[in-house]
Amino acid sequence: MLAGPPSLADPEIAGQTFSDHLAKAMASSLAGREQWTSTMIGPRSAVVHMWATREDGTRDEYHLMLTADYYDQWPPRAVFVAPPDVDSDDWTDPTTDSRWMPTIDQQITTANQFAFHPRYQYVTEGNAQRQLICFSHSFDYYITGHGPSDEQWWKQGRHTLMATLSRIQEALRAPAYKGPAGALNS
Amino acid sequence: MSEISEELLEEEVRLLEEQIELIEDEVEVVEEQIAAEHAHPTRPRAHVVIENQDDGETIRFWSPLAATVGQVISRMYAKFRLTQEAGDRLVRLSDGANVYPEADKTVKKYLEEQKEGTSLRWSFRSETGGA
């Protein structure tokens, strides 16, 4: 089990492990069924392109950035991002009324297993407000004062970024998934 | 790279992805056929396919119909090299039904009840916390 404050992983090992685990996840049966694709955007980060399904069957595409600076002793950081503008290469944090920010009904996803906050106060970062995909297979969960039970902790060797992706995919299905937060393309 | 070649490349990738999907569908059909052949009364066994959603691994093995679902679950943990933990979730892929309460049934009885042929297709994952 994890103990103490997170410390950065060896960049080379983290990058290789991340790359291996991403390849395995993208080759999984679930990835095939859900039509995941991915784009490496750095040695320790990638954007996974996923689909959400509304109650009426409408499908919406989302982009999830995974970052592996603490991987895989700790889970990857996971955030929904908006695609780059035509004159940029940067994937950005979507606004709270963005078409790239999902609406997920916490009452349905949980039993205290998963929540999504479009804006959350990061006390450790001077009360900065940013997105939090709040569950124990997401790095930010551990730096925002949450305390999982023994069974819920991220376990190196048992969990990979596949665990992160599969839970988020679950939340992107009706009835938990309600559609994009808004219509803005940013 | 020019815009036109990028478009051609994207189209090629799309076509390749479609081909991969078709191949995956064919593999699934063949797996079902193999499972059906091996379910012959003289070779009474079921094809078990379990996806581990924690690491992406999929295991496949044969189970005697006389074995219990609990024995199949034990074999799954051994093959995944895991010990069972509170909060683990094992569900039927087709409808999300919990498998653990069926542990005392034989595979034969379970297959008869689920009415989905001769394969057990399950999805495994451990518990998460979040709020």
Image (spheres, coloured by chain):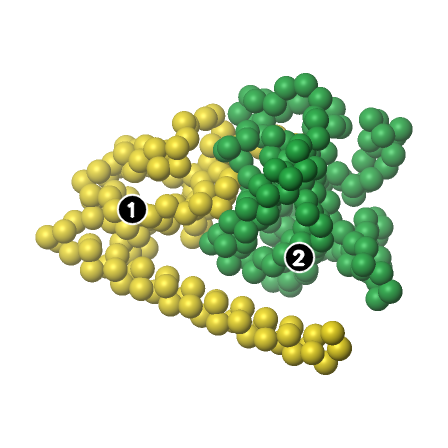
Color of chain B here? yellow
State left or right for residue B24 relative to residue B115: right
Q: Quadrant of the N terminus of chain A?
A: top right
Q: Residue at x 34, y 65 (%)?
A: B29
The answer to whether residue A94 is left or right of residue B119 is: right
Q: Which residue lies at the image location 66% right of the left edge and 33% below the top edge?
A: A10
Respond whether the residues carrying marks 2 and 1 are from the same subunit: no
State whether residue A147 is above or below residue B15.
above
Which dot, 2 or 1, sits closer to the camera? 2
Q: How dense is the environment of label 2, judged by Cα within 10 Å: few (below 14), some, or many (20 and up)?
A: few
Vertical position of residue A182 compared to residue A163: above or below: below
Write down the residue under mark 1: B61
Mark 1 and mark 2 in contact (Cβ < 8 Å)? no
Residue underneath mark 2: A39
What SS does tag 1 mark?
Answer: strand
In percent of width and height, residue B13 lies at 59, 71
Q: Is residue B48 above or below residue B87?
A: below
Separation of residues labelled 2 and 1 (CA atoms): 34 Å
Q: Quadrant of the C terminus of chain A?
A: bottom right
Q: Position of residue A106 (x, y in %)?
A: 68, 39
| Residue occupying the point 68% across, 44% down | A44
Chain bearing tag 2 is A
Q: Secondary structure at mark 2?
A: strand
Three-letter residue code for mark 2: Thr
Q: Colour of chain A?
A: green
